[in-house]
Amino acid sequence: MTSARRQLIDANVTPFYHVINRCVRRAFLCGEDRLSGRSYEHRRGWIVDKIKVLSAIFCIDICAYAVMSNHYHLVLKIDVDKAKSLTQKDIISRWCQITKGHAVATKYMNGDALIDGEVMLLDALLAEWHERLSSISWFMRCLNEEIARKANREDECKGAFWEGRFKSQALLDEQALLACMMYVDLNPIRAGIADSLQSSDFTSIQERVNALNPHINALQLAKTTADNLQQKPHKALAKFDGSTLLSQQTGIPFHFADYLELIDWTGRAMRLDKKGYIDNERPKLLNELGISPDAWLTSAKEFRRQYSGISGRWDSMCEFKKQHNSGKWCKGKASSQALHP
């Protein structure tokens, strides 16, 4: 039995979530259908473009993404501080970019006087819209509905396009967030359809690297421009802010240079044909977080299988389940617990 969204997404516990959606049809969401020979590659761009548009409207940041042939992964962050700072006009302006809004909201925006009943209605609408603007469920609804409609029009058919509602994982601590982001960014390499970060099309790591220097690998980029990486946040993606505590961060709680070093090391370890894939010197982030190389590589390859709706330290997962009155067992392999000393 599936769990209610309110039991799996709670910004008061963690702002970070891994979400996945899969296409229901035999035909690929993207890529090329081998039976018909028809290419759907352009649909990858639909998803990337739409998540950026929605991120600018919602109080939700994109930490990582990967668009694969028949599914996609997102790591999202609910920006609680941004949501709290929205004015009434901000809320109306943002929401009306998604829907037609309401006549009473238009009247308010035009500066017209409202009667008592209209004021009460506007207050109720503002409360509802404000909550939705920081809702991952509404973010995903707006994303999936538009992609489904466009695909159905292109295919000249009707019916469900997605397998079902999206799946989500709450990322409760720094280790879980790091492992999940790397799992998402390395999807094409793990699947064997790319052999480098630069060739990992439609991933956030390719976009971040290309925005800085597409001509050198991630490790060279991390070593040669470490001082400049923090000064050039990618405008469409969440910023790496360098803090190593979720409670003290405003973006992704790692330095980008350290992330690049680790993802290059991890990608090489996954590819046995890559020269130098065995490295005796552990990347800085593994040392800082006390993660063993073997446990890290297992998690980077099997993160989705190791955890169910939540990921983090064992005690944190059990507490999350308890707080949200879920009777399900916490799911996590023994090897994955080495990520959480």
Image: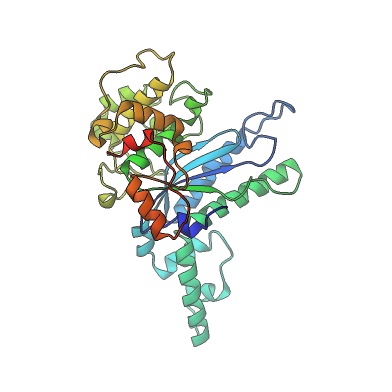
| Rendered position, 184 above or below 264 | below
Q: Residue 287 at what x, y percent from top left?
A: 24, 31
How many marks on residues?
A: 0
| Rendered position, 265 above or below 54 | above
Does residue 188 appear anywhere in the picture? yes
| Rendered position, 70 above or below 34 | below
Residue at x 49%, y 69% (from the top left corner): 128
Answer with left or right where residue 245 lies relative to residue 302.
Answer: left
Answer with the quarter of the image where residue 323 lies.
Answer: bottom left
Answer with left or right where residue 122 lies relative to residue 311.
Answer: right
Residue at x 32%, y 33% (from the top left corner): 259
Coloration mode: rainbow
Q: Residue 70 at what x, y percent from top left?
A: 61, 36
Residue at x 44%, y 36% (from the top left corner): 303
Does residue 14 appear anywhere in the picture? no
Q: Nearer the viewer, residue 46 or 107?
A: 46
- In the rendered view of the protein, which quadrant contains the C terminus? top left
| Rendered position, 324 above or below 105 | above
Answer with left or right where residue 77 lies relative to residue 149.
Answer: left
Q: Residue 219 at what x, y percent from top left?
A: 32, 23
Q: Residue 213 at what x, y percent from top left?
A: 37, 27
Answer with the quarter of the image where residue 11 lies.
Answer: bottom left
Residue at x 32%, y 35% (from the top left corner): 338
Q: Nearer the viewer, residue 49 or 322?
A: 322
